[in-house]
Amino acid sequence: MSDLAERMRARIERLYPICRSITGDGVRETLAILAESVPLEVRSVASGTSAYDWTIPEEWNVRDAYVADPSGRRVIDFRAHNLHLVGYSMPFRGRLSRAELEPHLHTLPEQPDLIPYRTSYYTRDWGFCLSRRHYDALGEGPFEVCVDTTLAPGELIYGELVLPGSDAGEILVTSHVCHPSLANDNLAGLTVAVELASWLAEQPRRHTFRFVFAPGTIGAITWLAQHPDVVPRVQHGLVLTGLGGPGPLVYKRTRRGDRPIDHAAAHVVAAHDGELRDYSPYGYDERQFNALGFDLPVGRLSRTPHGEYPEYHTSADDLSLVRDDHLLEALGALQEIVEVVERDAAYTNQRPYGEPQLGAYGLYPTTGGRAASEAVMAMLWTLAYSDGATSLLAVADRAGLPFAAVRRAADDLLRAGLLA
Ligand code: ZN
């Protein structure tokens, strides 16, 4: 395994057992782990603060949660798997019959070995999730139920990392941090985002890159409410999620569908045999950023999207679902997309009267022979279309060449004075 794959794997292994939610210590611990790799800043917003149509809820933390049988044995135990407890369960203690307990139990009858992932953020309730087989074996009770949680005024936190560029225009990259022990959704997105940020920190940058690691929905809306100054500067954006699971890369377009990020991502994802999809107002935080009031050009990169793979939002979304080669490929594709949005430009051919004699400029390989190399073809395509309006990305698409090859050709031609 490469060092890079090992680093990404080690990070998700550390993050996996943590009980995350939209608030609470799990998010603190998670951001602290991410901050070991990149210098992100943690921002805090108090419970009760409003953000457009939403209000920051009370902070939720868990000390313990279990259901015990008449002998005192824990038959459902939060400590064994954090998916056993419904996220945001309110505190509860009591002795319940099986019939009284059942409305609080959640299973997946169609997938009898898996624990479902359930939350109850905005309705005060408590509950436990368990596999159907486990449920069938619970016995008749009565049961001792303990939900030792706290819901109290506190804060919502998110992580933010800004890598300044030479221009004021920004590229927003976000990834949600609110899911407990689920690996593909979204530890895969987080670990890839962290490596993308570390790589970018070492690159020359035209745009300013802003990474936001926030809880889904409420976190994104809170970030938007708190950054009215930044919102107009966002020129491109990507939501990253589910990058390590099954299937090829899938890019979901922005609401308008014709933004530069859509063209850049389409070019790269197609080269990775991935899939392109149109916008829909459901999914991850792209729906907040693309909302009419903001209308930000934010697309989404994932693999097989939410709800379309059987492990989605179950205990089977574990470390074994995330493939190292998938994480590496996703990171590579993101680096390619970044290169396009950072370095795309339109130039003008300075010798448009026939084909310039490339050899005279030292641009034609002297050891040539049979077919023209990709480098020569990239120069010929670039000269053929550089009319001052056609972008290098459009040239690459038209030529069926990688953007990087066309960009290299343009750099050579610029040095030789053949493009301006
Ligand atoms: Zn999810």
Image (spheres, grey):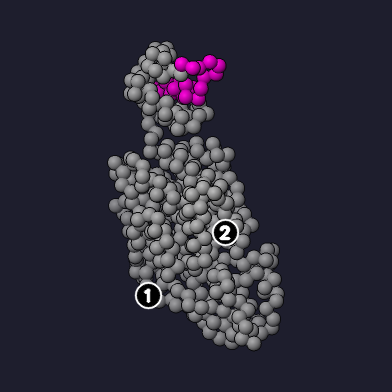
Specify whether 371 is left or right of 160: right
Q: Classify mark 2 as within 8 Å of ligand 1 or not, answering yes or no.
A: no
Residue drawn 31% across the image and 54% down it: 228
Mark 2 in CB contact with mark 1 (< 8 angstroms):
no
Query: Between residues 162 and 86, which one lies in front from this camera angle?
Result: 162
The quarter of the picture where the C terminus appears is top left
Taking 171 as reference, is 16 above or below it? below
Q: Nearer the viewer, mark 2 or mark 1?
A: 2
Asked if the stretch drawn in magenta spans residue 408, the answer is: no
Residue drawn 37% across the image and 75% down it: 153
What element does badge 1 sit on? Answer: loop
Query: Between residues 157 and 294, which one lies in front from this camera angle?
Result: 157
Q: In the image, residue 24 lies at what x, y percent?
A: 42, 70
Taking 407 as reference, is 224 above or below it? below
Stretch in magenta: 366-387
Specify whether 121 is left or right of 101: left
Specify whether 110 is left or right of 169: right
Q: Is tag 2's residue or tag 1's residue first in the polypeptide sequence?
A: 1
Local packing at callout 1 (Cα closer than 10 Å; few below 14, some 14-19, many 20+) is: some
Name the residue beneath numbered marker 1: 153
Residue 301 visible in this rendered orientation of the protein: no
How far apart marks 2 and 1 lie (CA) works out to 33 Å
Name the residue beneath numbered marker 2: 319
What element does badge 2 sit on? Answer: helix
Q: In the image, residue 199 lies at what x, y percent?
A: 40, 46
Asked if the stretch drawn in magenta spans residue 378, the answer is: yes
Residue 86, numbered label: none
Q: Amino acid at mark 1?
A: Pro
Q: Amino acid at mark 2?
A: Leu
Q: Classify mark 1 as within 8 Å of ligand 1 or not, answering yes or no.
A: no
Local packing at callout 2 (Cα closer than 10 Å; few below 14, some 14-19, many 20+) is: many
